[in-house]
Amino acid sequence: MTPSDSIPPIVLAETACFFDVDGTLAGIETRPEWVTIPGDIKQALCDLSAAAGGALALVSGRPVAELDSLSAPLRGPAAGVHGAERRDARGAFHRVALSGTIATALARELKQAIAAFDGCHVEEKGVAFALHYRQGEHYRDRILALAQDMVTRYPELVLQPGKCVVELKPAGVDKGAAIAAFMQEPPFVGRTPLFIGDDLTDEAGFKQVNALQGISIKVGPGTTVARYHLDDVSQVHRWILTLAKQQENHFIKTKNSVGEGL
């Protein structure tokens, strides 16, 4: 992993851009509903998406509907719940679903069990469940044991650990698979993938991008397979704004060159 000043120059017309949200585009908050993306970053993402011909997608543990709300006015390709739901560039949805019986039973059992842990809560995502313990970190081992018990009882599920959270999600779903699916479709196909993320949930994405000889960027500390590094969310924001400004300058320069040639 090398620092930010070693990240290679980005040619958006040749790049497929993938961004995690929490801990990458937005700071981590005590509760997920408190998270926001600054307005200038949302506008910069819109500009980058346009410059990349639409080859920009958010890839997150959040449902796609939440991603749309957080990133508006950006609305484009997105993978939610670690890829269990995915909207392609045509607007078509692809979903991996749990049976209604399993989802209902899990929701009931998890809510009853986690009620014993003050400060912890269950986030229902339709096709996955997140057990948050940021306000009750001393319960970590008991939360993980609860999650492991559920996976043992429901083999359709696997565990996805994160920062003060553990998720139960459908087996075979991860951010790497979501990126791989995007990379087989227009406008992503044939481009160099770039993925920025901060958490354990992003490692599958980094592995996929590395396999495609792309640009993988880890935000913050921790062991990773990512090849490049940004220190924190504020540095991600500076990098995005710089890249957007470069695209604007390139557009102005190109426009002026065309005008001079008339």
Image (spheres, rainbow, N blue to C red):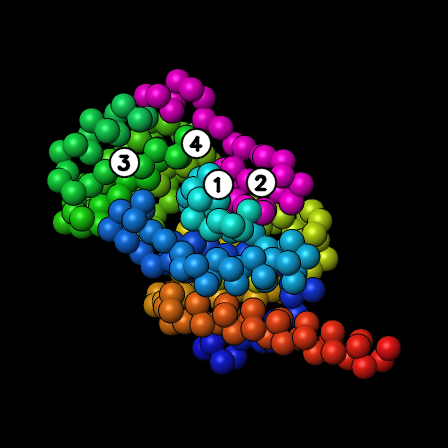
Relative image position of residue 247 (x, y in whole percent): 62, 71
Gap in Å between the C-alphas at discs 4 and 1?
Answer: 12 Å
Specify whether residue 28 is in view: yes
Q: Residue at x 24, y 51 (%)?
A: 30
Tell whether label 2 touches label 4 (CB within 8 Å): no
What's the amino acid at mark 3?
A: Val
Q: At x 81% / y 81%, what residue is drawn?
A: 260
Q: Earlier in the sequence, mark 4 or mark 2?
A: 2
**Which mark is in front, 4 or 2?**
2
Which residue does the numbered mark 2 point to in the structure image?
87
Compare residues 171 and 237 and report the one nearer the observer.
237
Give the numbered dot on residue 64.
1
Q: Nearer the viewer, residue 141 or 38?
A: 38
Residue 208 vs residue 22, the one in the foreground: 22
Alpha carbons under labels 4 and 2: distance apart: 15 Å
- Of the numbered discs 1 and 2, the one sitting upstream in the chain is 1
Q: Give coordinates of residue 31: x percent, y percent.
A: 26, 47
The residue tagged 3 is: 122
The residue wearing badge 4 is 127
Element carrying mark 4: loop
The type of residue carrying mark 4 is Val
Q: Which residues are magenta?
A: 76-105
Could you tell me the amino acid type at mark 2? Arg
Can residue 66 be found in the magenta stretch?
A: no
Query: Of callouts 3 and 1, which one flags the residue occurring earlier in the amino acid sequence?
Result: 1
